[in-house]
Amino acid sequence: MPAARIPLGLPRFDAAAMANVAARLTPRDYQILEHLLHHRVLTTHQLQRMFFTKPQPTRRRLGILHKLHTITRYRPWTPYGGSAPHHWVLGRTGAELLALRGHTTVKELGYHPDLAMSISVSDKSGHQIGVNDFFVALLHLARHTSEAHLRAWLSEKQCAKIWGGLARPDAFGCWYEHGHQIDFFLEHDTGSMTLAKVADKLAAYTDLADATQITTPVLFWLPSRARETNLRAVIKATEMPIATAVQTDLDDGPAGPCWLPLPSRAGQSRMRLGELSNAWPHLALGRSPEQPTTTSDRDSYDDSRFPPKAQSR
């Protein structure tokens, strides 16, 4: 059925209309909706790197999903002219379809349309896009590399649900590449916080490691080499496994050889993300994906949640 014939003003609980829209959605569409639910906002370019290959099919499909009211969008104001890309947010109909598919309710999903769109005027919008960009780069590489997988990507909200108030990472990830695997907490730094406050976050991660008996590396993704150097000087000695890197658009992005562990040996060269666990051989890091701690963890390690390899359309 052509998109123009789909009723656009969908009643809140119109089962027939919902079934009509659901019949138009593909498994990839549902993956897009799920990522928007968990990670709040993704740009057109990010969604292209995650699920498509070319701009035109990306814009066409997102336009259809928008007409179906499954997603909505906004464009941030740009102070120096030009226009920002569309930023996409989960729509009410998309949330209802996810709830129906998951045998739950929109409320239990934690979705509210006004709160979903609040990111459009939040001063945290740029930070959220930066966090998501980190994982989108990993997903993009994994789509084109047979021996690479992003086995987990948990948002700040999902982390809070699992680990409570002990620590508040920007995200949690599990990255596998060529036989190496590492669990990690991400701290995406924009330079807006003093280095002393950034370093103070490590106390919470130490408390979390003590409480769970699981030591998970903390990765600091920094905006400049100068800030990285200064942060490492402030941190100095710590019991937590830490690595720092400067945000880069180079090939392989955060998966590449950009990470410097702390503490580091004299002449220590930068390491790939997947190899970082070798920097702390005396520690039992992370957890086994086959033996997750909670149901939420088990779900997060399901590779089927992410785009399949070689999906090109």
Image: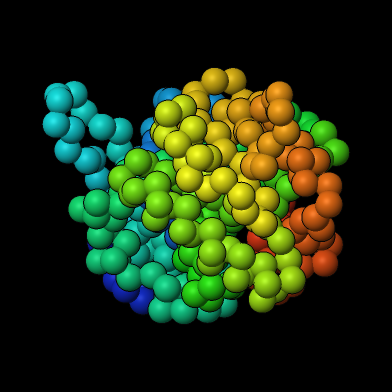
Image coordinates of residue 231 in percent, x first then y, are 47, 41
Residue displayed at 24% across by 51% down: 123
Give above or below for 32 relative to 61.
below
Pick the residue in front: 99 or 143: 143
Give above or below for 24 relative to 2.
below
Give above or below for 122 relative to 99.
above
Residue displayed at 76% across by 36% down: 275
Q: Quarter of the image for the C terminus: give it.
A: top right
Which residue extends farthest top? 250
Residue 168 in view, yes or no: yes
Pick the residue in front: 65 or 274: 274
Image coordinates of residue 24 in percent, x first then y, are 49, 52
The answer to whether 180 appears left or right of 210 in the picture is right
Image coordinates of residue 164 in percent, x first then y, are 53, 76
Residue displayed at 20% across by 53% down: 121
Would you identify the image quadrant in which residue 223 lies? top left
Residue displayed at 61% across by 65% down: 206
Would you identify the image quadrant in which residue 3 lies? top left
Residue 312 in view, yes or no: no
Image coordinates of residue 59 in percent, x first then y, are 39, 33
